[in-house]
Amino acid sequence: MKAFGVDIGGSGIKGAPVDLVRGDLAEERHKLLTPHPAAPAAVVDTVCEVVGHFGHRGPVGITFPGVVVDGHTLTAANVDEGWVGLDATDHFEQALGLPVALLNDADAAGVAEMAFGAGRDRGGVVITLTFGTGIGSALFVDGVLVPNTELGHLELDGHEAEKRASSAAREKHDLSWPKWAERVDAYLAHVEMLFSPQLVIIGGGVSRKADKFLPHLKRRRAEIVPAQLQNNAGIVGAAMAAAKLG
Ligand code: BGC
C-alpha cells in the first residue's frame, strides 16, 4: 500500500510516495528549497510543486514545524507569522484539490520511528526529539502519541532550549560536537526530570552523525538512541497520517 507524504522543514520541502508496508520511500524524494520568508502562500505553492512532480492523486500527509490542532496551525516559531491561527489544511486542500492530513513535523517523525524505526514495539513513555532548525518533540505513552508537546521551548540556562541546543544553534555558535553535546546533555537531563522516559530517540539531520555526539552524552536512566529513518521520518509519518484519511 502506498501513500504520499510531504515534510516542510526550515531549509527544504521534500516529498515522496511511501511504501507503508516497508515504512520507506517508494521513490526517490523530490526536494525544493523552503521559500523565505516561509509565508503561507509561498509554502503552499512549493508543496503543490513537490506533489505535482509525482503527478500524485489521493490523500496527502503534510508536516508543519509548529503546533497543529484540528487542521489549524497555531504557532510559527521558525516560519512566517502568517501561519498563526490559519486553517492551513483548508489552504492546502484548495490548492492541491486533494484531501490533506496536517500534523506537527516532530510528531510525524516520531510516529514513523514508533512504527518502523527505533521505537518499534516499545511501550511505556518514549520521546522522540528532532534536532534541526529548532527542537521538535513527540511524546508516546504505550505507543499512543500525545501531540504538540513542544519540548523545544523548555527553558535551558535562561534561554529557550532550541536556541541553545538545536542543530542550527550548533552551526550558528560554531560549537564543536563535544561542546554542543554538553548543551544537549543539559537539555536531556531536564526532559528526563520532567517525563522519566524509558527511551529517547534522537532524530533530525544530526541523527546521521550520531557517532559524533552520542558518545559525549552522559549515561542516563533512559536509553538514548539515534533515529533509524533519519531524514525520511517526517515524510513517512506524514504519509501514515494521509493513509488514515482513507
Ligand atoms: C516548533 C515545533 C517544531 C520544532 C521542529 C519548533 O520551533 O515550535 O512545533 O516541531 O521547531 O521543527
Image: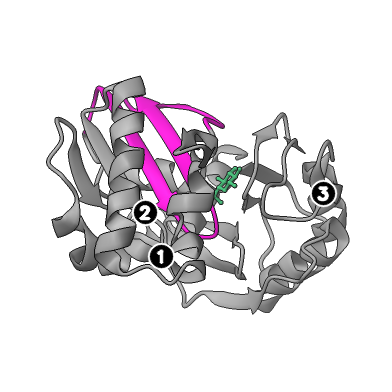
Work out which quarter of the rendered image holds the N terminus and state it.
bottom left
Q: Quadrant of residue 226?
A: bottom left
Residue indicated by mark 3: 81
Mark 3: amino acid: Glu
Q: Position of residue 229 (x, y in %)?
A: 33, 59
Q: Tell me what residue is drawn at x 59 percent, y 61 percent.
A: 9
> Which segment did they paint magenta?
122-149
Q: Looking at the image, is 195 positioned above or below residue 65?
A: above
Cα–Cα gap, marks 3 and 2? 26 Å
**Per the image, is 132 magenta?**
yes
Which disc is residue 203 wearing?
A: 2
Q: Position of residue 190 (x, y in %)?
A: 34, 31
Q: Nearer the viewer, residue 154 or 158?
A: 158
> Counting other residues with Cα less than 10 Å from the Cα at mark 2, is it few (<14), some (14-19), or many (20 or more)?
many
Residue indicated by mark 1: 205
Query: Counting residues from the N terminus, which is met first, the one under dot 3 or under dot 2?
Result: 3
